[in-house]
Amino acid sequence: MSNFRIALAGNPNTGKSTLFNLLTGLRQHTGNWPGKTVIHAEGALDYKEKHYTLIDLPGTYSLYSNSADEEVARDHIIFERPDVTIVVLDATALERNMNLALQVLEMTSQVIVCINLIDEAKKKGIEINERKLARKLGVPVVKISARNKTGINELLETLDQMADGKIATNPIQVTYSNDIEEKIAQLEPLVQRAVGDAFPARWVALRLLDGDKSFLNALKKRQNGVQKEVAVHGYSACH
Amino acid sequence: MDTQHATSIEQLFGYSQTLTDQDVREEIVSSIYQTTHSICKDVVHYSNKEKLQRSEKLDKILTSPIWGFPIMLAMLAVVIYLTIAGANIPSDAIANFFNWIEGYLTAGFKAIHAPEWLYGILVLGFYRGTAWVVSVMLPPMAIFFPVFALLENFGYLPRVAFNMDRLFKKSGAHGKQSLTMAMGFGCNAAAIMSTRIIESPRERMLAILTNNFVPCNGRWPTLILLSSLFMAASFTGGMKTFITALVVVLMVVFGIIVTLTVSWVLSKTALKGIPTHYTLELPPYRKPKIINTIVRATLDKSLYVLKRAVIVAAPAGVLTWVLANLYIGDTSILMYVVHFLDPFAKAIGLDGFILMAFILGLPANEVVLPTLLMGYLATGALTEVDNMSELSHIFTSHGWTWLTALNMMLFSLLHYPCGTTLINIYKETKSVKWTFVAFILPTSLAIIVTFLVNQIVRGLGLV
């Protein structure tokens, strides 16, 4: 059975942990307030001959490394490179939640956008056109209610197809001001030369322009780590 | 080759810094906001605007400058009132049940001619200790946790944080500390982890060092039980329950005042600085899944705390029994320890047994009260306990007054964090020094406060 790593990202208090518990059968503490999950939890799920490892990332409003939990979420998506990232959004506050989805889409194209609390939204008279949204974002969008267990099958089905590589995505790219876009264009080839294809060059260029020291340090740490590993391998090869 | 990578990305970082000025972050964020706005405009449709405002109307009341605090305190009082009123009856019933079992156990041990020391360790130490934990702690928890969880799932806790926010900023701490403090009401060890949501290391340290001043799951039962046994002794019926609840609420308020004061002092001295700005977001109210929440809270939380208590209480029970029954000369080791601690403990209004229970209770606050009872029982003052009024008798026969109870409640509220919390503080701060501060600061405070209370009350001749 093939193994896939799935990350769950989303704002705090969107029912991410509820979905995680539902999918994995684990019992992480859930509650209606921000900051519940600060370290990530791992669980497993089997669906249609595939084995999935689910990682529940800390809920964050952005991935600009303002705090330790944002760093945890960012590092996971960039360095661990999950096979699929599910971004969980709160249907009752879609606009505010969407900012994080756009940031994730700048980092990886293997994304499923999962709109949770759809029951809640319906009660409040909020209607979301998920097909239109999927076209705009360039990735699949699934509406669910983790509490009422609706839409879960569709989510798993989408996951299954994305894991098989049957879904072609074309994630939306945020267009920045001309000034920034010019600088990105200038930096992108340099980034590619410096770090190779392992990381999305446009995103790294943006981080550099933003002066994101925390990301730079994380990247250097990774590279040193890789170096050490290489050295150890070299030693055993000589033996 | 890899070294080359590292330097070149670093050079690239330096280079890109020369390209930009300060405003890049703002421009990036505003472009993202514009994009989301234009996406959502086309995709989301609102058919009932009025319903959306309901949450705002509720917030106007619950977080209003005038009503916010009274409502908060009233809610806390109601939760604790329900807990105390409801817990009395089951406690007796459970105690009776365990007693009934103990009769059979005793008969069983006699029947197989088990040696006296084995009977002592297993039944008088292990079993009785465990039985006490369960019958004293389970009923209040089975009421308190579900009610608390309902409020939590409804979305009230962020409003509490919102109300507290201003006070924390004034004391030089981060507004989010109100959230980590709210989490501390459940478990300080978990709350220490949750301080990760605070960006600035200075403000995070403030939150870590002061988190202990709100009572956690392990300490609620001690506060509630002592309050109901001693603080409202001269009242009866509903009034008694009300006074009991009031005293516990005052304890919590006192804990919050200490939190704010200590934060303020630290932010003026060891952890100087001005609070960073942030916006606290209020999540929507949600109707909790009532049955689900109650079942989960009872099963998960109550059983979790109980399991923790029993796991630590069982060895503590055995240890207490052994210490009480190993003699050097004609005095048991337990009594040596108690006598040794007694003069100091008396000065702060406690006694040697209570202080010993707090020391043995370092791994988990849950076991302080059971260990204390075992200590008292092991000295042979009373051999069997079958209801809650006799529980009060155990204390008074060891010279307890309401002042002893008050000082034990204060010490429990203010003293060092439990072992798990200390380990988490070390993990989060990676500093022996700060972990030690997190231990010594509350402990000194607990000693000073109880000492003053004891001396003042005695000096005024109130006891």
Image (spheres, coloured by chain):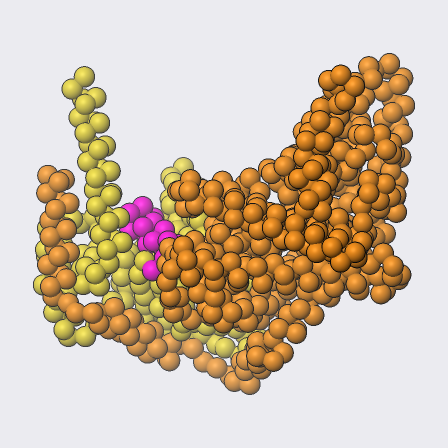
Chain colours: A yellow, B orange
Taking the image as shown, residue A233 lies to the left or right of residue B309, namely: left
In the image, A85 versus B105, the foreground residue is B105
Q: Residue drawn at (57%, 68%), measured in percent from left and top?
A: B160
Taking the image as shown, residue B320 lies to the left or right of residue B35, namely: right
Taking the image as shown, residue B457 lies to the left or right of residue B33, namely: right
In the image, B280 versus A86, the foreground residue is B280
Residue A101, image x and y in percent? 35, 64
Q: Residue drawn at (22%, 27%), measured in percent from left and top?
A: A232
In the image, B147 versus A51, the foreground residue is B147
Residue A207, image x and y in percent? 22, 60
Residue A210 drawn above or below residue B339: below
Q: Which residues are magenta?
A: A66-85
Taking the image as shown, residue A145 lies to the left or right of residue B16, namely: right
Q: Residue drawn at (53%, 62%), measured in percent from left and top?
A: B261
Residue A119, image x and y in percent? 55, 69
Q: Residue drawn at (17%, 26%), measured in percent from left and top?
A: A234
Residue B408 drawn above or below residue B356: below
Residue B3, image x and y in percent? 13, 40
In the rendered image, the residue lying farthest to the front is B459
Residue A10 drawn above or below residue B91: below
Residue A84 within the segment the image draws in magenta: yes
In the image, B135 versus A103, the foreground residue is B135
User: Which image quadrant is residue A105 in?
Assistant: bottom left
